[in-house]
Amino acid sequence: MSFDRIPVIDLEDALKPEKKQQFLRNLQDALVNVGFFLLVNFEQFGPSTAQLEDIKSEALKFFALPDEIKQECGMLNSPHFLGYTKLGDEITGGKADWREQIDLGTELPAPENPEPLYKQLEGPNLWPRPEYAPNFRPVVTDYIKTMTELSTAFRSLICEAIGLPAGRLDSYFKPNQQCKIKLISYPEKANKEPQNLKEGKPEDAQGVGPHRDSDFITFIFQASEHTGSLQVQNFQGKWVPIDNVPGSLVVAVGQTLEAITDGVCKATIHKVTSPQEGAGVRLSIPFFQTIDIDSRKSAVSDLASDVLRLRDERDKSIDNWGVDVGFQFKPDLVKHPVGHAVFWNRIKSHQDVAARWYPNELKQVLAET
C-alpha cells in the first residue's frame, strides 16, 4: 500500500524519554515510506512564531516592490545562481514555472578559485537595496541562521530513525555550510499572461512542475492559507495534497539524503499547482539544507539489514510513478563531487543565467535533452 496522506511528526516527542522511541519509529516510516511529513512543535530548535511572521512580512513587501527594483538583484547578475527570478524564467521538466522568487543563502564570499565550475554554487547574495527593503536582509539572515540550527539538530534524529549513530552523517557537512532559501510568490491562475510564458499555453503553466528536491532535506514554511496547491505523488501515481496545518513546517527528503542513505530515505516527486482564480497569491518559503559540495563520499555502508529490508519492500510497491523525473546522482557520489550534479541541475533550471555565465555548459545540456 502506498501513502494517501502526509504524516504529522511532533518534535516535542523527541525530547521526552517515554516518547522518543515511538517518535523515531514514526519518523522512520515518514522518511522511508513517504518522503514528506508535517513537523509541529519545533520552536525549541526552530523559528518562533514572531520569526515566521517577520519573514512572511518581508517576503510580501519584497514582491510588492516595483519590477525594476527587484531586477537590480536579479539572478542574471549572479554566477552563483542567487538572486531574483521573474515570472516564467525558471524551468522544470522543460516547462516554465509560473512563480517569481528570490534565491538566497548563508552569506559566503565568492570562491577564490572558480574551478571546477561547481565551486560557483557558493558565493555572495544579491540583496535588495536597504532604502527599499530596510529590514529584509537582517530578517532573512536571522531566519537562515535559525533554520540551519533546526536542520542540524534534526539531522541527528534522522540518523537515529534509520538505525545510525546520531552523528553518523556529520562528515558530509562542513563548518560554514551554505544552506539555501527561496522566497516564492505563486500568482493565481487569473493572472497568467501568455506573452510572459516561455512556451506553452497559459492553461499549461505550472506553479512548479513535478520534481524531486536536490539537497539533503527541505523545510517549507507555507506562509499563506492555501490548501492543496502543494502535492506529493505517491507510489501508485496518485497526487496527494498537503494540508496547510497552522504552526507546521512541511519537510521533504532531498535526493542527496536518498543517495547517501543508499535509497533508504525517499526523495518523493512533488509539484505546486497555481492557486485558483480568486484565491490570491500563494506564498512559500522553503529552506534547503545542503551538504558539502566537495563531498565525494559514497552511501553509508553501515545501514542495518532490517532498515535495508524496509527500503526493498517499499521499492517493490512502486508500480506506477505516473510522472517520473529521474534522479540527479548517477550512479553514486564517488565518480563526481556532490556539487557536480547540483551545478548541472542549476544549468537546466536557470537557462538564462547559464547563457550569460556558462554558455558552453548550457549548449551541452541542451544537446543532451
Image (tube, helix red, strand yellow):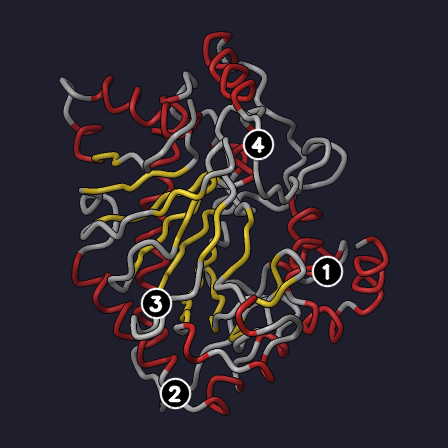
User: In this rendering, which labeled residue sits more in front, label 3 or label 2?
Assistant: 3
Q: Are marks 1 and 2 in contact (CB under 8 Å)?
A: no
Which of marks 2 and 3 precedes in the sequence?
Answer: 2
**Is label 1 or label 3 in front?**
3
| Helix, strand or loop for disc 1 | loop
Estimate how packed mark 4 is, as few (under 14), some (14 to 19) or many (20 or more) residues with alpha carbons within 10 Å.
few
Tell me the kind of residue under disc 3: Arg
- Residue pictured at 25% horizontal, 36% vertical: 8
Please state, as top left, top right, bottom left or bottom right, where the C terminus lies in the image.
bottom right
Numbered disc 4: secondary structure: loop
Which residue appears at 22% of the width and 28% of the height?
14
Q: Work out whether residue 51 or residue 241 is closer to the camera in this orientation and state it.
A: 241
Question: Residue 61 in the image: x percent, y percent?
Answer: 31, 81
Percent coordinates x, y for residue 308 in the rendering:
52, 14
Q: In 3D space, how far apart are the residues under numbered discs 1 and 2 (Cα atoms)? A: 35 Å
Amino acid type assigned to the residue bearing label 4 in the image: Asn
Q: What's the CA distance linking mark 1 and mark 3? A: 39 Å
Element class at badge 2:
loop
Q: Nearer the viewer, residue 3 or 7?
A: 3
Give the distance between the C-alpha atoms of the residues marked 4 and 1, in whole angstroms: 45 Å
- The residue lying toward the viewer, choosing from 188 and 290, is 188
Q: What mark, if any, has residue 282 been given in the picture?
A: 3
Q: Dot 3: what SS?
A: strand
Classify residue 117 by image quadrant.
bottom right
Amino acid type indicated by mark 2 = Leu
Give residue 65's mark: 2
Find residue 113 and name its label: 1
Mark 1 crowdedness (10 Å alpha carbons): few <14, some 14-19, many ≥20: few
In the picture shown, does residue 306 fall above or below 8? above
Which residue corresponds to mark 4? 320
In the image, is 283 to the left or to the right of 170? left
The amino acid at mark 1 is Asn
